Amino acid sequence: MTQVPESTYRIQFHANFTFHDAVKIVPYLAALGITHLYASPCLRARAGSTHGYDVTDYNQLNPELGGEEGSASLVACLRQHNMGLILDTVPNHMGVNTNENAWWNDVLENGRGSRHAHFFDIAWDLSHRPHLQGKLLLPILGDHYGRVLESGQLKLLREDGRFALAYYQRRLPVSTESIQKMSRRVVDGGDELASQISANPDLLHELVSLQHYRLAYWRTASDEINYRRFFDVNDLAAMQMERKDVFDATHRLTLKLVHEGAVAGLRIDHPDGLFDPQQYFDRLKSAGVNYVLAEKILAADEPLCRNWAVAGTTGYDALNVINGLFIDQRNAEAFSRLYQRFTGDAFSFPQTARECKLLVLKTLMASELNMLAHMLDRIAQSHRDSQDFTLASLTEALRQLIASFPVYRTYITGDGASARDAQVIDQAIADALECNPELEPSTFEFMRAVLLLQWPAERQQMLRFAGKFQQLTSPVAAKGVEDTALYRYTRLLSLNEVGSDPGIFGTSPARAHEYFSQRQRLWPEAMTTLSTHDTKCSEDVRARLNVLSELPDQWSFHLEQWMRLCDGCGVEQSDLYTLLQAIVGVWPPDDKVDEQLRDRLKNYMVKAMREAKVRSTWTHPNESYESSVADLIDSVLISGEFTRYILPFIHRVARLGVINSLSQTVLKFTASGVADTYQGTELWDFSLVDPDNRRPVDYALRERLLQEAQVFSPSMRDCWQDGRVKLFLTTRLLHLRRSVPGLFTRGEYEPVRVNGRLANHVFAFTRSSDNRTALVAVCRLPASLAEDSWPIGEAVWRDTTLDISLDGDRLEDIFTGKHPGSLKITDVFSDLPVTVLLSS
């Protein structure tokens, strides 16, 4: 099996879907045409983890998934079917809210003296309180420390000959020195020592005070936490992966699996969290890892770093370009007007994003900002030209600069800053000053000089600051934009995806051709995907909602009916606007409205409202308001008025959404790079954000339908409800990629011009390699072409043709087996709204 995949199939492993479960579906995946299984993290994680990103032991396979034996069985089965394995890897952080992380527990017991202390990114001397210097903040308590202590929730236990502080199921190691000191205060030792200390809050407090950590109420984390986290998750502590010994210790097993041939490549989770991503990728390359994908979130005009030793990104950039092709850009202003009219939101997306990042810096990540400001203040005080900058002014300037950052981060290293790094910083400074004309420009000039390593200060000190600055802009962007702004600015939810800019209403064909051409030249083996475990909604939900972009007047009319139907329910109009889009997106083809569907919508709305942080939040949930939304969902979906006024519109959008779905599926497999299929999405998948997109997959159904989807039949097209037509396209394209390897990765990409009145409704290109050519054409913006669904009559297409000098008689449609004869769209799209014509 080649190291570089032609295609991947993403599996989410957990205790209810193990290595042994994966073995059972490998024959199906092979029959589908997949070349590589793409696994979520498989190293030992927190007990009961549903995702695996909370690794507790980098050098042990997860026993809940089947451990070494299960992994070996899966690898053997994959080899038997000529398939490989791509493994998701988590270098940025470890799960620490557990008794199972030996490294973290060693740090808790021994503090700075632990041989693992430097593994974690801890600022031991952050606290301004002398008695807390050198202590690690542990914000794990459900109430104020004093109340927890007095109520007896915290106890000293002796288990297996070792003392530990017990807080419910959590066990926290205590230092040997503290036990020795307390033993001198209490007459009896052993179990009696534990019981006597537990019975006396004063003694217990004294023991706790002697530890290398400070127990605290979880709400203190945002202001005082002194270890870097994954975003704002206290249970995920960041690693100092820039240290070579930390890299070696955390990658021993992973590299062993690669060297043994069990793993063909790695997907690197959140590389922007690392101090020096380039250094990390260079180390993987030096260690013999030849295929690496980076989960890098790129802004709309941001290039991937050319000096990274990776095959490319995991595909969010490709997802957003493909998705944008099915947005009708001509209706951008109309959509903005109706969105403002129904929600009252007059902010642009950049304004919303900036406000949300400021909110995150004020609340969730205030401690990280505080740490950074103190680092900058020390640099300022080291030189006479900057000693008059106050800590308060530096903190505010940093807050505004980070909120104005146009990308996740820069990549300044010991080698200096690139021209693009300087450009990004200059743009952020200009935007920050434009929004805050009262701020002193010289403060920003000082910060610029420090970040670009140009201030007359100690270079390593500036480099450390620049690295920490870069490690903060990234999570602020993720929490402020992905996890807040995308839930506030909901003009069209299909645009609200990871790495997207919802203020940009779609992608022009010219821009898409430019993107795919450049990606083929620079990153031919990058991943292309349409759905992941992190997408805000599935590809088929997006395909439906994109239809709305073509129908602003009809959407506005039905919104009016919806608002009238919901009048007096006590739910804000902005939430009603979001809810109706969610209903349109997930409405089942069989119209079955059951408790499961209602619960899915309720759970989605709770998450959407708490992430938006307007009427409810995760830290202060407004359960009364959330109940009003839940009550509305229970009542409105079964009302006669909904069925009469709203449902017919949903049906039409759903039928047209099928055309979008098939078209984007073809583009995923042919336009650029390695094609990834998220578990279950080979059939229709109308899922919302996690955990909705991690529901169990019915593989028995897929295996049965795959047997029926070997030969094209018009019934597939007509019976769109069961998704066989999507499965048919998927398996044909996967087998084409297997039979002509390299055609859709290394093969040349050439745009094809479309002539005729409806040229804007067709997107076409060729892929060529080793004397083989594939001509690809898909339909876009179908609402103005078809009243309900496919096929579209010859009279509609009329003079629309593909302008390319290929002989239609020598081209075979891989779906129908037909030779179109001509390249008129009426011939090319005679059976389906898509075609892939392969030269003979």
Image: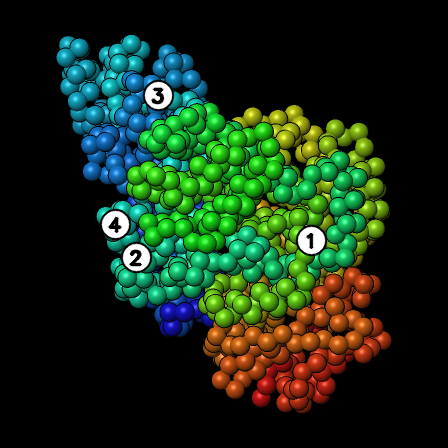
Give the numbered dot on residue 505. 1
Q: Is residue 182 visible?
A: yes
Question: What secondary structure is found at the residue carrying circle 3?
Answer: loop
Q: Please report the residue visible at 56 percent of the width from the left and 50 percent of the height from the top.
A: 498
At label 4, the amino acid type is Lys
Q: CA distance from mark 1 to mark 2?
A: 40 Å
Q: Please report the residue visible at 79 percent of the width from the left and 54 percent of the height from the top.
A: 551
**Tag 1 or tag 4, which sits nearer the N-term?**
4
Q: CA distance from mark 4 to mark 1?
A: 45 Å
Question: What secondary structure is found at the residue carrying circle 1?
Answer: loop
* Above/below status of 614 relative to 29: above
At label 2, the amino acid type is Arg
Q: Quadrant location of residue 286? A: bottom left
Q: Which residue is mark 2?
A: 283
Q: Which residue is mark 3?
A: 128
Please count the marks in the image.
Answer: 4
Q: Position of residue 321 (x, y in %)?
A: 61, 60
**Tag 2 or tag 3, which sits nearer the N-term?**
3
Q: How is the image coloured?
A: rainbow
Q: Is residue 59 visible?
A: no
At label 3, the amino acid type is His
Check disc 4: other Cα within 10 Å, few if <14, some if 14-19, many if 20+: few
